[in-house]
Image: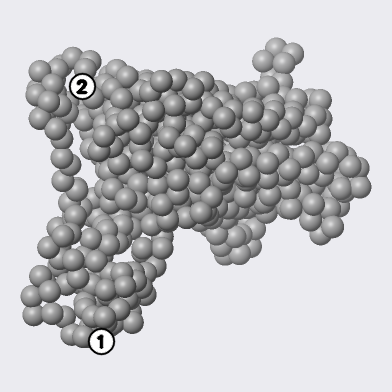
Amino acid sequence: MVLAGSHSGDKENETVVDFKGKPFDKSRTGGWLAAGLILGTELAERICVNGISMNLVTYLVGDMHISASKSANIVTNFMGTLNMLALLGGFLADAKLGRYLTVAIFSIITAMGVTLLTVATTIPNMKPPACSDYRRLHHECIEANGGQLAMLYVALYTIALGGGGIKANVSGFGSDQFDVNDPKEEKAMVFFFNRFYFCISLGSLFAVTILVYIQDNVGRGYGYGISAATMGIAVAILLIGTRFYRYKKPKGSPLTIIWRVAYLAWMKRKLPYPSDSSMLNEYHNTMVPHTQRLRFFDKAAVIDDSEVKEIRTQNPWVVSTVTEVEEVKMVLKLIPIWSTCILFWTVYSQMTTFSVEQATIMNRNIGSFIIPAGSMPFFLIITILIFTSLNEKLFVPFARRITHNPKGLTSLQRVAIGLIFSMVAMVAAAIVEKQRRVMEVQQHIKISVFWLVPQFFLVGAGEAFAYVGQLEFFIREAPDKMKSMSTGLFLSTLSMGFFVSSLLVSLVDKVTKKGWIRNNLNKGRLENFYWLLAVLGVVNFLVFLAFAMRHQYKVEHYNTSNEENELKDWNGENIEDLEKIQKVEEMI
């Protein structure tokens, strides 16, 4: 029997236990059995969230008779809140609950939310009276009232709360099932992340094809009911596996460190800087080299004469260490890049709102089969999978020959390519929408819905670069103790992208007096909104380049054996394996 405690000097495993709080037994806990049970939770969460977000706008416009602009904002606010709540989920797991309890609790909350949504869309009184095509054309439909929307909102934001908690912790909890100090388990962890991404894609594909079809052709209640049942089964499977998991004890949230450094720097703002930086607290024991940037935060590490006695009590709220101050500086250095990544997800959000709304009034026939409008994001997901594969097999090897960089492209170069794709996508979307509207209004011809494929393709290709680039950037550039928080910071760019979309739609509605975005897209000018996003994309890209060119990457330390292998396998496949393993090491 092999116990974790048998590894001498292994600090990582000292905090890893079984469900009884004892050192874990490798033969009975963790590994693929435990990780597979955890993957089921992410698969169910993806089915629920995508099954709702990708087709919700058609329900709001068609059944609840809400305007196109307001419906789009409801969807983007829902998705924005879900991603923002990932910060809360990460904080609770790190500070108190641990990943298992957080995933279990928030999975139950998600199941409750989807059940509420099923009820809200099934009860006849929860919807306004049905509206004929004639009344819809003359804007005579009765819009859903506050009471009918109340239960819908409660359901959606319950799902957002649960989904945020799952999203922040499920991948980390899955990776906890492998021992990074065991070469075999470390290699297995690489495949875990591959399969984790596969589960996300599999759940998304099921949601935008089978689930959306059921929602449109059988009934919303049935579609959401399947999602609720799926989440319920996932919760049961997660709980059944309790005795098979390995658990890492929570060590406290890095958000506390950031808050403490900021608080102490402000409270000590009137104290003079020491004549020599070496006089700062724990200067000679710092794990991160001291820098002169953002010098204001150095005040948190200044030792006041009156605090000498209190310092002996090791009270962290008296004075911070240089290491803590520098770690906070490193996080703040990410903010400029963070701010310029937001607009990509603003563009992405259009694929689940206005692009789907466009599809509802286009020719969706393939023979006698009618493609559900909410299934159009299928092309987005397929493109992401294709380009992700091409990145490893084609783009990265090709880029290596040009850049002489083992990674092929740096993380910020990947983000830049993603931003370019997003700009081109909005140009394509504007051109197609203008042509669609002209053909339908002037010639009474509904063009094929497949004319929307280019914008889904371009955004999907952009996500394949931008998502990986942003995730890698925030993980690599963050302090070693703040990897989980930096992942939350990355997810907050998605959140802010959806919120910015809502803000832009509201502003455009007000400025144009609802001239661009109307319930009847044939009477609006949606292409102008796409052109606006394209122009904003160009400005944002130029700002991004300015920040990216000034950014200095954190120095990475590689062991000698890895460096030698990289030189030997420059044109081989081993280099890709090394990169994947190295990424996994940093992600956990």
Q: Which mark, by number, is residue 109?
A: none
Residue 120 horizontal/vertical position (percent): 82, 44
Mark 2 residue element: helix
Residue at point 21%, 30% (across, down) = 407
In this picture, is 312 found above or below 196? below
- The answer to whether residue 312 is visible is yes
Residue lying at 43% horizontally and 35% vertically, measured from the top left: 23
Q: Which amino acid type is marked by label 1?
A: Ser
Within the image, what quadrant is residue 427 found in?
A: top left
Name the side, left or right, on which 225 lies relative to 346: right
Type of residue at label 2?
Answer: Ile
Please tell me the numbered disc located at residue 306: 1
Residue that mark 2 sits on: 575
The image quadrant that residue 53 belongs to is top right
Q: Nearer the viewer, mark 2 or mark 1?
A: 1
Can residue 403 be seen in the rendering of this structure?
no
